[in-house]
Image (cartoon, helix red, strand yellow):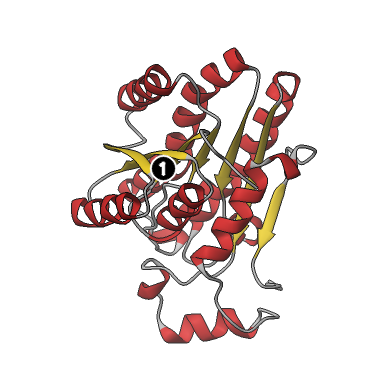
Amino acid sequence: MSFSDHVVVVTGVSRGIGRAIALRFIAKGAIVAGIYVKDDAAADELTAEVGAAGGQMLLFKGSVADHAFVANVMKKVFDTFGRIDALINNAGRTSDQMALRMEEEQWNEVLDTNYVGACYCSQEAVRYMVLQNRGSIINLASVSGIYGREGQCNYAASKGALMGLTKLYARLYASHNIQVSAVAPGMIDTEMTGEVSQEKLNDFLRHTLTGRQGSVEEVADAVVYLAGPAASYHTGQTLKLDGGFLR
Protein backbone atom coordinates (compact mmCIF):
# COMPACT_ATOMS: atom_id res chain seq x y z
CA MET A 1 0.00 0.00 0.00
CA SER A 2 1.64 3.22 -1.18
CA PHE A 3 0.82 6.74 -0.03
CA SER A 4 3.16 8.36 -2.51
CA ASP A 5 2.55 12.13 -2.64
CA HIS A 6 -0.31 11.88 -0.15
CA VAL A 7 -0.36 14.55 2.56
CA VAL A 8 -1.13 13.37 6.07
CA VAL A 9 -1.61 15.62 9.10
CA VAL A 10 -0.71 13.97 12.42
CA THR A 11 -1.33 15.67 15.76
CA GLY A 12 0.72 14.82 18.84
CA VAL A 13 3.46 13.80 16.45
CA SER A 14 6.63 14.11 18.48
CA ARG A 15 6.36 11.04 20.71
CA GLY A 16 4.74 7.67 21.22
CA ILE A 17 1.90 6.64 18.95
CA GLY A 18 1.97 9.87 16.93
CA ARG A 19 5.65 9.45 16.16
CA ALA A 20 5.16 5.84 15.06
CA ILE A 21 2.23 6.84 12.84
CA ALA A 22 4.27 9.61 11.19
CA LEU A 23 7.20 7.28 10.50
CA ARG A 24 4.93 4.59 9.08
CA PHE A 25 3.33 7.05 6.66
CA ILE A 26 6.77 8.41 5.69
CA ALA A 27 7.91 4.85 4.94
CA LYS A 28 4.87 4.49 2.67
CA GLY A 29 5.84 7.61 0.69
CA ALA A 30 3.54 10.18 2.29
CA ILE A 31 4.34 13.77 3.18
CA VAL A 32 3.62 14.35 6.86
CA ALA A 33 2.57 17.63 8.47
CA GLY A 34 2.99 17.16 12.19
CA ILE A 35 1.67 19.18 15.12
CA TYR A 36 3.31 19.05 18.54
CA VAL A 37 2.90 21.22 21.60
CA LYS A 38 6.16 21.40 23.57
CA ASP A 39 8.84 18.72 23.21
CA ASP A 40 11.35 20.41 20.89
CA ALA A 41 14.05 17.80 21.50
CA ALA A 42 11.73 14.96 20.46
CA ALA A 43 10.59 16.97 17.42
CA ASP A 44 14.21 17.54 16.37
CA GLU A 45 14.93 13.83 16.77
CA LEU A 46 11.95 12.94 14.60
CA THR A 47 12.97 15.48 11.95
CA ALA A 48 16.45 13.96 11.79
CA GLU A 49 15.07 10.43 11.44
CA VAL A 50 12.68 11.47 8.68
CA GLY A 51 15.48 13.30 6.86
CA ALA A 52 17.78 10.28 7.11
CA ALA A 53 15.04 8.15 5.56
CA GLY A 54 14.65 10.60 2.67
CA GLY A 55 11.17 11.61 3.76
CA GLN A 56 9.42 14.98 3.75
CA MET A 57 7.82 16.48 6.83
CA LEU A 58 6.64 19.88 8.07
CA LEU A 59 6.36 20.50 11.79
CA PHE A 60 4.14 23.04 13.53
CA LYS A 61 4.42 23.85 17.22
CA GLY A 62 1.23 24.81 19.04
CA SER A 63 -1.87 23.53 20.78
CA VAL A 64 -4.69 21.80 18.96
CA ALA A 65 -6.99 23.55 21.45
CA ASP A 66 -6.08 26.88 19.79
CA HIS A 67 -8.58 27.17 16.95
CA ALA A 68 -6.77 30.00 15.15
CA PHE A 69 -3.50 28.05 15.23
CA VAL A 70 -5.19 24.94 13.83
CA ALA A 71 -6.89 26.92 11.05
CA ASN A 72 -3.56 28.48 10.06
CA VAL A 73 -1.81 25.11 10.00
CA MET A 74 -4.43 23.48 7.77
CA LYS A 75 -4.39 26.45 5.39
CA LYS A 76 -0.59 26.41 5.23
CA VAL A 77 -0.54 22.68 4.51
CA PHE A 78 -3.16 22.97 1.76
CA ASP A 79 -1.56 26.07 0.22
CA THR A 80 1.83 24.34 0.20
CA PHE A 81 0.85 20.93 -1.17
CA GLY A 82 -2.60 21.50 -2.72
CA ARG A 83 -4.19 18.62 -0.78
CA ILE A 84 -4.90 17.09 2.63
CA ASP A 85 -5.50 13.37 2.22
CA ALA A 86 -5.70 12.27 5.84
CA LEU A 87 -5.98 13.73 9.31
CA ILE A 88 -4.89 11.66 12.30
CA ASN A 89 -6.27 13.13 15.54
CA ASN A 90 -3.76 11.63 17.95
CA ALA A 91 -2.94 14.47 20.37
CA GLY A 92 -3.96 13.51 23.88
CA ARG A 93 -3.21 13.90 27.53
CA THR A 94 -4.24 12.50 30.89
CA SER A 95 -4.74 14.04 34.31
CA ASP A 96 -6.12 11.23 36.42
CA GLN A 97 -8.14 11.64 39.58
CA MET A 98 -11.17 10.05 41.20
CA ALA A 99 -14.44 11.57 39.96
CA LEU A 100 -15.42 13.31 43.19
CA ARG A 101 -11.97 14.86 43.52
CA MET A 102 -11.55 15.98 39.91
CA GLU A 103 -10.61 19.65 39.69
CA GLU A 104 -12.10 21.94 37.05
CA GLU A 105 -8.65 22.49 35.55
CA GLN A 106 -8.19 18.73 35.13
CA TRP A 107 -11.51 18.45 33.32
CA ASN A 108 -10.73 21.36 31.03
CA GLU A 109 -7.15 20.52 30.07
CA VAL A 110 -8.00 16.91 29.14
CA LEU A 111 -11.24 17.67 27.30
CA ASP A 112 -9.68 20.64 25.48
CA THR A 113 -6.82 18.57 24.09
CA ASN A 114 -8.45 15.19 23.54
CA TYR A 115 -11.87 16.25 22.28
CA VAL A 116 -12.11 19.97 21.50
CA GLY A 117 -8.75 19.89 19.73
CA ALA A 118 -9.94 17.02 17.55
CA CYS A 119 -13.10 19.00 16.78
CA TYR A 120 -11.05 21.99 15.62
CA CYS A 121 -8.67 19.88 13.53
CA SER A 122 -11.51 17.95 11.90
CA GLN A 123 -13.52 21.10 11.21
CA GLU A 124 -10.60 22.82 9.48
CA ALA A 125 -9.23 19.81 7.58
CA VAL A 126 -12.59 18.64 6.27
CA ARG A 127 -13.08 21.97 4.47
CA TYR A 128 -10.25 21.04 2.12
CA MET A 129 -11.24 17.39 1.87
CA VAL A 130 -14.69 18.44 0.66
CA LEU A 131 -13.08 20.60 -2.04
CA GLN A 132 -11.06 17.64 -3.32
CA ASN A 133 -13.96 15.19 -2.75
CA ARG A 134 -11.81 12.66 -0.88
CA GLY A 135 -10.03 12.13 2.39
CA SER A 136 -9.96 10.24 5.65
CA ILE A 137 -10.04 11.20 9.32
CA ILE A 138 -8.79 8.76 11.95
CA ASN A 139 -9.44 9.54 15.61
CA LEU A 140 -7.35 7.93 18.36
CA ALA A 141 -9.86 6.95 21.03
CA SER A 142 -9.27 4.46 23.88
CA VAL A 143 -10.78 1.47 25.61
CA SER A 144 -11.28 3.89 28.51
CA GLY A 145 -13.90 5.59 26.37
CA ILE A 146 -15.64 2.26 25.79
CA TYR A 147 -15.58 0.75 29.27
CA GLY A 148 -14.76 3.67 31.56
CA ARG A 149 -11.75 3.40 33.85
CA GLU A 150 -11.54 4.29 37.52
CA GLY A 151 -9.70 7.53 38.09
CA GLN A 152 -10.08 8.54 34.43
CA CYS A 153 -13.52 10.14 34.22
CA ASN A 154 -12.18 13.13 32.28
CA TYR A 155 -10.10 10.98 29.91
CA ALA A 156 -12.88 8.41 29.41
CA ALA A 157 -15.41 11.17 28.72
CA SER A 158 -13.13 12.80 26.16
CA LYS A 159 -12.52 9.54 24.32
CA GLY A 160 -16.20 8.56 24.40
CA ALA A 161 -17.05 11.94 22.90
CA LEU A 162 -14.43 11.37 20.22
CA MET A 163 -16.15 8.15 19.17
CA GLY A 164 -19.42 10.06 18.91
CA LEU A 165 -17.70 12.68 16.76
CA THR A 166 -16.44 9.88 14.54
CA LYS A 167 -19.98 8.67 13.84
CA LEU A 168 -21.25 12.20 13.19
CA TYR A 169 -18.52 13.12 10.70
CA ALA A 170 -18.85 9.78 8.94
CA ARG A 171 -22.55 10.44 8.41
CA LEU A 172 -22.04 14.06 7.32
CA TYR A 173 -19.26 13.52 4.79
CA ALA A 174 -19.71 10.04 3.31
CA SER A 175 -21.23 11.63 0.21
CA HIS A 176 -17.93 13.50 -0.30
CA ASN A 177 -15.95 10.24 -0.30
CA ILE A 178 -14.51 10.99 3.15
CA GLN A 179 -14.07 8.02 5.49
CA VAL A 180 -14.04 8.71 9.23
CA SER A 181 -12.98 6.02 11.70
CA ALA A 182 -11.58 5.65 15.19
CA VAL A 183 -9.05 3.33 16.79
CA ALA A 184 -9.45 2.45 20.47
CA PRO A 185 -6.12 1.14 21.77
CA GLY A 186 -5.78 -0.71 25.02
CA MET A 187 -2.58 -0.57 27.06
CA ILE A 188 0.12 0.51 24.61
CA ASP A 189 3.79 0.67 25.59
CA THR A 190 4.46 4.44 25.51
CA GLU A 191 5.84 7.18 27.74
CA MET A 192 2.29 7.75 29.00
CA THR A 193 1.80 4.16 30.18
CA GLY A 194 5.29 4.25 31.67
CA GLU A 195 3.75 6.40 34.41
CA VAL A 196 1.23 3.68 35.31
CA SER A 197 2.08 1.78 38.50
CA GLN A 198 3.16 -1.83 38.09
CA GLU A 199 0.17 -2.93 40.18
CA LYS A 200 -2.32 -1.23 37.85
CA LEU A 201 -0.47 -2.48 34.78
CA ASN A 202 -0.55 -6.06 36.04
CA ASP A 203 -4.28 -5.76 36.80
CA PHE A 204 -4.96 -4.49 33.28
CA LEU A 205 -2.93 -7.27 31.67
CA ARG A 206 -4.68 -9.94 33.77
CA HIS A 207 -7.85 -8.98 31.89
CA THR A 208 -6.16 -8.87 28.48
CA LEU A 209 -6.25 -12.09 26.46
CA THR A 210 -2.81 -11.61 24.91
CA GLY A 211 -1.32 -10.87 28.33
CA ARG A 212 0.88 -8.06 27.05
CA GLN A 213 0.94 -4.40 26.12
CA GLY A 214 0.55 -3.43 22.49
CA SER A 215 3.26 -1.61 20.56
CA VAL A 216 3.05 1.81 18.93
CA GLU A 217 3.90 0.15 15.62
CA GLU A 218 0.80 -2.07 15.88
CA VAL A 219 -1.36 1.02 16.36
CA ALA A 220 0.37 2.75 13.45
CA ASP A 221 -0.35 -0.22 11.17
CA ALA A 222 -4.05 -0.04 12.04
CA VAL A 223 -4.16 3.70 11.33
CA VAL A 224 -2.41 3.29 7.97
CA TYR A 225 -4.91 0.58 7.02
CA LEU A 226 -7.89 2.77 7.91
CA ALA A 227 -6.46 5.71 5.96
CA GLY A 228 -5.87 3.65 2.83
CA PRO A 229 -7.95 2.29 -0.05
CA ALA A 230 -8.31 -1.15 1.56
CA ALA A 231 -10.61 0.45 4.15
CA SER A 232 -12.78 2.39 1.69
CA TYR A 233 -15.90 0.57 2.95
CA HIS A 234 -15.05 1.19 6.62
CA THR A 235 -16.52 4.35 8.11
CA GLY A 236 -18.28 5.50 11.26
CA GLN A 237 -16.83 2.66 13.33
CA THR A 238 -14.33 2.26 16.15
CA LEU A 239 -11.70 -0.44 15.76
CA LYS A 240 -10.73 -1.88 19.15
CA LEU A 241 -7.03 -2.64 19.28
CA ASP A 242 -6.66 -3.89 22.83
CA GLY A 243 -5.28 -7.42 22.82
CA GLY A 244 -8.68 -8.79 23.82
CA PHE A 245 -9.30 -6.56 26.83
CA LEU A 246 -12.28 -7.97 28.72
CA ARG A 247 -13.42 -5.19 31.03
> Residue 134: where, in percent of width, then height?
65, 24
Comparing 154 with 66, the one in front is 66
Q: Residue at x 44, y 64 (%)?
A: 98
171 up-or-down from 163: above or below: above
> Residue 32: where, in percent of width, then height?
42, 40
Element type at marker 1? strand
Choose top left, top right, bottom left or bottom right for residue 58: top left
Q: Residue furthest top?
A: 131
Q: Residue at x 49, y 42 (%)?
A: 89
Q: Which residue is mark 1?
A: 11
Residue 179 relative to residue 138: left or right = right
> Residue 159: where, in percent of width, then height?
55, 49
Residue 186 relative to residue 155: left or right = right
75 up-or-down from 218: above or below: above
Q: Residue at x 58, y 81 (%)?
A: 212
Comparing 11 with 82, the one in front is 82
Q: Residue at x 73, y 38 (%)?
A: 236
The type of residue carrying mark 1 is: Thr
223 up-or-down from 241: above or below: above
Choose top left, top right, bottom left or bottom right for residue 195: bottom left
> Residue 187: where, in percent of width, then height?
54, 70
Q: Residue furthest left?
A: 41
Query: Counting other residues with Cα less than 10 Å from the Cα at mark 1, is it few (<14), some (14-19), or many (20 or more)?
Result: many
Q: How many marks?
A: 1
Comparing 93 with 20, the one in front is 20
105 up-or-down from 186: above or below: above
Q: Quadrant of the C terminus?
A: bottom right
